[in-house]
Amino acid sequence: MNISGIAAFAKSLTGDVVLPHDRRYGKLRRVSNRAVNMHPAIIVRCANAEDVRLSVEFARDKGLLTAVRSGGHSFAGHGVCDDGLVTDLSLMKRAWIDPVHEKIRIEPGIIAGELDCLTQSFRMAVPLGSCPTVGVAGYSLGGGESSLTPKFGYGCDSITDLEVVTADDKVLRANASENTDLFWAMRGAGANFGVATLIEFQLHPIETVLSGSLRYPIKQAIRVLHFLDSFAPTIPAELFLIAAVLPHPGERMLDIKVVWTGDKEKGERSLRPLRKYLRPFEDTIQPKAYLDEQRGGFDVPEGEYSSHRRAGHFKRLTDDVVETIIEHASNAPHEASGITMMYWHGPWCARPHDNAFGFRRTGFEYWIHSYWRKTAERGRSWDWVEGFYRAMEPLSTGAVYVNDLENEGVARARAAYGDKYDRLSLIKGKFDPDNFFRVNQNIPPPARRH
């Protein structure tokens, strides 16, 4: 693709431009999911907010499809595009922490492991998942689930201030008193409205947790899952609970992971019914530093891999749900395939909050996943995920967490935003009427009247 003006554009940047002939291009065009294999015309490695503004201006003037990337972990591969421009934020890693007022302000290149290390230096945290290489910006602006969520909320609920480059290359502040509609929309559907170049979070005190796993052979999974169906609705907001069918030497296993964020003695009492119901072959629950828990919770294969995921939500572990899980999880194509179910509960999940995040549902969020390294494994892996999902779909509520989606169409994106969708579309029409930011789980602006 021949794009005029690249040399002058590159000179205007503090960062730099990477083109297909550059030796860095092959690495920088890739995202975490190697199943996504796209070739952008230009990659802009931004060093500051002005570079981001110039990148948006250049792409708009040249009519280039634009993708925005911080960590590159989007399952749909939204951090890259074919024949367009990638606004790469990974070099923007400055952070300012105010422990007195329990606030932190970060640039969008910060990844989760870096933020955890910084905030834990002051015995505080932002609600984040346990994958250390996920970009904090994209993750939190899409919601941001965490073991801290039942007690402290989703990542987007802790955002208190934003600096945003909009589609008309303006730099705006968005908070509770400035550009309030943009502030509302960015916290839950941020990729649709602009590029966040600064994000301020409220911090939460956390230093130690009670956490670990109870592991059972797959033959005991039916009994344990039926117990969870009655146990989960009784648990307090201090307890985060995940059930997953995972590989174990010789057979599949059921892993029940817990993170308790409150008083240790109260946690021991709350967990006693679960630990005593049926003896697991392994019980690793113990007190540990929160940072150690975060570092130990990542279960995706290391190195380069391709993946496919389908996700949804169900309220209860009914007989039909349990039977479907056991049937399909027991026939996984290889070890790096399974189902994970997070139980969401507490005040942040059960009632509305004043932002755009659309997945506040009590019950089990689930995702069915498969990872593979060899091209020959793709067909079996993909078909297994799709077959499992088709069996689960009639048993599900239809709700889905936006960060779980791949490229699944308008109806699924609408389901992710839920009853916030129509208001989001109107705000899209105000800040991005031409749908410049559309490499995302897209919310088109309202059709213009002529």
Image (cartoon, rainbow, N blue to C red):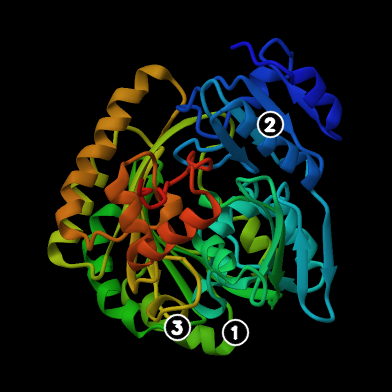
Residue indicated by mark 3: 347
Image point 33% across, 63% down: which residue?
418
In depth, the one of 329 and 401 nearer the eye is 401
Q: Quadrant of the C terminus?
A: top left
Image point 24% across, 59% down: which residue?
398
Please indicate whether residue 53 sits to the left or right of residue 94 in the image: left
Residue indicated by mark 1: 264
Task: Tell me the quarter of the picture where residue 19 sits.
Answer: top right
Residue 69 placement (x, y as % from top left): 62, 40
Q: Quadrant of the N terminus?
A: top right
Q: Amino acid at mark 3?
A: Pro
Q: Nearer the viewer, mark 1 or mark 3?
A: 3
Q: Measure the C-alpha gap from mark 1 to mark 2.
A: 55 Å
Residue 84 placement (x, y as % from top left): 57, 25
Residue 261 makes an appearance in the image: yes
Q: Amino acid at mark 1?
A: Lys
In depth, the one of 269 and 102 nearer the eye is 102
Q: Secondary structure at mark 1?
A: helix
Please indicate whether residue 427 sits to the left or right of residue 8 in the image: left
Q: Secondary structure at mark 3?
A: helix
Residue 18 placement (x, y as % from top left): 73, 21
Res. 58 mark:
2
Please indicate whether residue 405 sits to the left or right of residue 137 in the image: left
Give the crowd class for mark 2: few <14, some 14-19, many >=20 residues within 10 Å: some
Q: Earlier in the sequence, mark 1 or mark 3?
A: 1
Instruction: Please tell me whether residue 3 is drawn above or below residue 124 in the rendered image.
Output: above
Q: Earlier in the sequence, mark 1 or mark 2?
A: 2
Q: Number of labelled discs?
A: 3
Image point 25% across, 70% down: which residue?
315
Q: Amino acid at mark 2?
A: Phe
